[in-house]
Image (tube, rainbow, N blue to C red):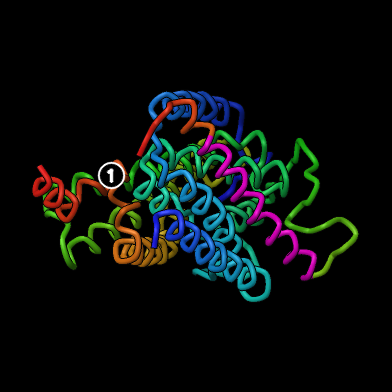
Amino acid sequence: MTTNQKTQKTIIIGLAVALIFVIVGTFVLSYSMETLDKQAEQLGAEEHPVYEPPFPDYVIPGIDSVWGALAIGVAGTFLLFGVGLAVAKLMHLKKGQKS
Amino acid sequence: MHIPDGFLTPQVFIPAFVITILFWAICLKKVKLTDKQVPIMGLLTALFFAAMMMNYPIIGGTTAHLLGGAAIGLILGPFAGGISVTIILVLQAFLFGDGGLTALGANVLNMGIIGVVVPCILFLALNKAFKGTGKKLYAIIFVSAFLGDVLAAIAAGTELGLSQPVFQYGLSVAVPAMAINHSIIGVAEGIVTMVLIGTLLKLRPDVLEQSPILKRLPVFQNKKEANE
């Protein structure tokens, strides 16, 4: 197996694992109450957002269902892969590095 | 561990931004990626974005998620690792409101700098002291990842504790609460990091060999010496 084939296989397996994480995170481990949120709740401290994100709390506006959250998670995973790869390629090209 | 807008005072979030910007500048100047590491950076960025979607119940009705900084830092090195975690945090803040924009510097400082750099430094020191082979290697990875998470949580607790009058608990409550609760997820972080690096060590040692951190493992050093 060539290095390119090995890399393709690694990426496919890795992304499959990431999608399993998204499914588990959406259907099983979705409830979030972080320590700092709990402390804020006890103190009566409130969030004061300075910006309205397009998909607040990983929800598609108007589609408040678990399937919408799953779609966001899947799309987000591929987006992060694309952005991470693009930034890595840019840094690699800029430095003109070789393996 | 994503701090939202409104929890930190300017006296805390502005210095955090300054530290973060300096770190980004150092990262962009020092980062070195090989051909083999480029796709792996994309993969790890996506993998730990997805891993952060899983919220594990810990104690007192609270939850926590993996940070990923240890695995990303050890595999890519602290500079590429810092940039990778920063990409996750920036997109989470701008697209999903997961972490505030005013707190972005603090969140990057905690998860993208401390959560990445501390495990790298600890790993290098422990590997030098104990020679990371066999079970010792996995113990070194576990300890590095665990302490990276705990120190990131302590940093977040410190920022919250210093943000008077929003967090009236102060340092004496905020720091221990964050450290104790996040030590549990630190155990999970240690196990996941061990499994990921152990798997790559078996299946893709060629990728780990190019890590500025993991290339110092005896297995790679011995191979290098044999080739010379």
Q: Please name whichever residue, A56 or B13, is drawn nearer the observer in this view of the structure.
A: A56
Up/down of B29 relative to B7, above or below: above
Look at label 1 and name its amino acid: Ile
Q: Residue at x 80, y 46 (%)?
A: A54
Up/down of A18 relative to B126, above or below: below
Residue B141: % across, % down:
28, 58
- Name, please, the residue furthest toward the front: A2
Residue B12: % across, % down:
54, 30
- Name, please, the residue furthest toward the right: A62
Q: Please name whichever residue, B19 or B194, is drawn nearer the observer in this view of the structure.
A: B194
Q: Where does label 1 land, which residue?
A: B213
Q: Please name whichever residue, B89 or A44, is drawn nearer the observer in this view of the structure.
A: B89
| Residue A87: in magenta span | yes
- Taken as a whole, is the magenta stretch helix, strand or loop? helix
Which secondary structure lies at badge 1? loop
Q: Residue at x 31, y 65 (%)?
A: B198
